[in-house]
Image (cartoon, helix red, strand yellow):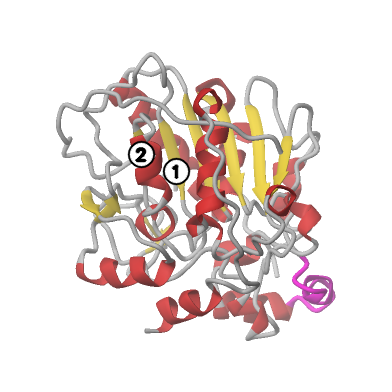
Amino acid sequence: MAQKRPMDHSDMGQTGSRKGRSALRRVAPAGVLASAAVVLGAALVIGVGAAPIGTGIAAADPIARPAAVPLDPGPPQTDHLAAARYLRQHPDAAPEGTNDFGCTPSAEHPRPIVLAHGTDSSAYSDYSGIGPKLVQAGFCVFALNYGGKAGGKSYGTEDVWASSAQIGAFVDTVLAATGASRVDMVGFSQGASVTRYYINRLGGAAKVGQWVGLASPSYGGIMYGLVPVAQKAPFIFTLAEMASSVAAIQQAAGSPFITELNAGSDTVPGVRFTTIGSRVDEMIQPNSNIALHGEGARNLVLQDYCSIDLTGHFHMVYDPYVQQMVVNVLDPEHAVQPPCVKVELGTGIAEVVEAAHS
């Protein structure tokens, strides 16, 4: 199928002042895999479903809808299913404390944090847990809903090149609102790829201090050998796209997007890159594809720090140990050692499936 193109860890801190909420609801738009039908579709939902339509302006691309900035503070949740249920009643939900455009970064935490969700998901669905923790640590935190399809009920499903540009426009909005010169970025799954594309290929390196990729499909996934088969029988990609989304297929190992993203080097000078991954990631196979190889990249593996925590791809953003790892990486001066608690293999998968189909 033709592809469209256009562990050491540390942290915590003090809250910046807040001056109220802006009416900003939009940013300017720019614009792996399921099994031959089932595996290649269920598996390639690299984020989570159940994200309702948000607010935005007319998109230049008639297929995509504009990125939206949710402004209705929602409570922290413990898993994707709980977040999905809350979203059904509160479609403009944002992670508690985020998207306060009156937030002034403190001297201790001068860079605002921009969060990017995964495929077929939303800011609240993926960051209702991590977002509030970063706010409590003293950061100004922002999260958008990007890459939605016109008339769709979710985000992160459309062309990843366009989504990367939407991310860039949002960064400009955040910098203008806060007066900061740079942001830090956290991306989960597809969010890691589109934020890194913005940094590496769209000039974002000058505006970003640190990038953290959670369950980052840095080199895509072969999905237990299905991708190589599909590359020899391209109609499988077509079936997979119908079962999942354009964005999911574009993140397969060896795809044009993944190839371009990593061309030359998978990192660029001036930005600190950190991945946080799991050896039992259900989506990214082999799991070594999470790691970056460029100069200065750090690749943290959850089980190196807590061997009994078998959190995989889907539960990553709701695992308490991982959440603290994120805070520690972004704020090493106030690092907190999280308790190491046993987590069973496959935790979170049932919640993801129910969230997507209930």
Residue 115, position as x, y percentages in the image: 44, 43
In this rendering, is residue 184 above or below 196? above
* Quarter-of-image position of residue 341: bottom right
Vertical placement of 318 versus 96: above or below?
below
For label 2, the residue is: 142
Residue in the image at 49% along x and 30% along y:
184
Q: Which mark is residue 223?
A: none
- Image disc number at residue 115: 1
Whether residue 296 is visible, yes or no, is yes
Q: In which quadrant will I find the C terminus?
A: bottom left
Examine the rendering and report whether any part of residue 153 can be seen. no
The residue stretch that appears in magenta: 222-234
Among the two numbered marks 2 and 1 on one chain, the one whose residue lies closer to the N terminus: 1
The type of residue carrying mark 1 is Leu
Q: Residue at horizontal 73%, vertical 51%?
A: 290
Tell me whether the residue at label 2 lies in contact with that at label 1, contact meaning CB atoms closer than 8 angstroms.
yes
Residue 299 in the image: x percent, y percent? 73, 41
Determine whether the residue tagged by mark 2 lies in a helix, strand or loop.
Answer: strand
Nearest the viewer among 339 and 292 is 339
| On screen, residue 49 above or below 284 | below
Q: Locate residue 46 relative to residue 228 in the image: left or right.
A: left
304 or 18, nearer to the observer:
304
